[in-house]
Image (cartoon, rainbow, N blue to C red):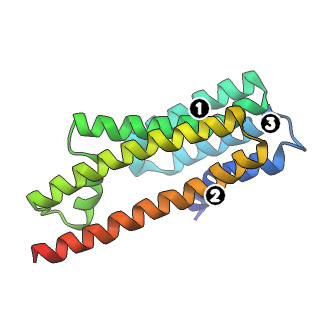
Amino acid sequence: MFRLLLGLVLLLYPLAVYLGIGALAPWKISLALLVVLVARFFLSPSDKQWGGVLIGFGVLYCVFAIWQNSELSLRLYPVGVNACFFLLFSLSLIFPPPIIERLARLQDPNLSAQGVSHTRKVTQVWCVFFIINGSIAAGTALWGSFFWWGLYNGLISYLLIGLLMGTEYLIRIRLQAREQ
């Protein structure tokens, strides 16, 4: 339960920054994020490999943001998260199996050749998504108002992630139905 709560806190980071920036110094918000990231790492024993990479990035980011103590450093976190996910997904294409195939095999260990091909394409789509999403996050951080940064990174990007996940799920269901 506590692990789930920490995950929710990480998802709500843009909202926390948006609401907290008027009351707290940026370094304090970064320190709070650092505590949540470290707690999440120690409470997620099954996710050490990929989670460790993401947590490692988060710790480095937090140290940077504490040192910078600026609003901009807080706003760059979603850019870094997208860059990390892009790196992880693209590396999984170079060093197979791709991340989406690994996830698909949790549901169906005997994934067909067509399923393997599909998961590779979906991993590529996610790579493109992370580039676009990270670019928009960078644009809102550098040139957008705090309101637009919070709206995009705290709501719109999550809706886009959900849309992409839902679309991929429906396509996968159709492909599975055709195979049977």
Q: Is residue 124 left or right of residue 80?
A: left
Question: How many labels were placed on the picture?
Answer: 3
Label 2 crowding class (10 Å Cα cut-off): few <14, some 14-19, many 20+? some
Q: Looking at the image, which is closer to me, 26 or 179?
A: 179
Q: Which mark is residue 155?
A: 2
Q: Are marks 2 and 1 in contact (CB under 8 Å)?
A: no
* Residue 34 appears in view: no
* Residue 41 appears in view: yes
> Which comes sooner in the sequence, label 3 or label 2?
3
Q: Residue 96, percent across and down?
A: 20, 41
Circle nearer the viewer, 3 or 2: 2
Disc 3 to disc 1, C-alpha distance: 14 Å
Tag 2: residue type? Leu
Disc 2 to disc 1, C-alpha distance: 24 Å
> Which comes sooner in the sequence, label 2 or label 1?
1
In the rendered image, the vertical position of residue 99 relative to residue 113, given as above or below: above
Q: Residue 165, percent across and down?
A: 41, 62
Tell me the residue that label 3 is attached to. 28
Tell me the residue that label 1 is attached to. 59
Which residue sits at x=68%, y=36%?
141
Indicate the secondary structure of the residue bearing disc 3.
helix
Q: Looking at the image, which is closer to me, 68 or 43?
A: 68
Circle nearer the viewer, 2 or 1: 2
Q: Looking at the image, which is closer to me, 42 or 83?
A: 83
Disc 3 to disc 2, C-alpha distance: 23 Å
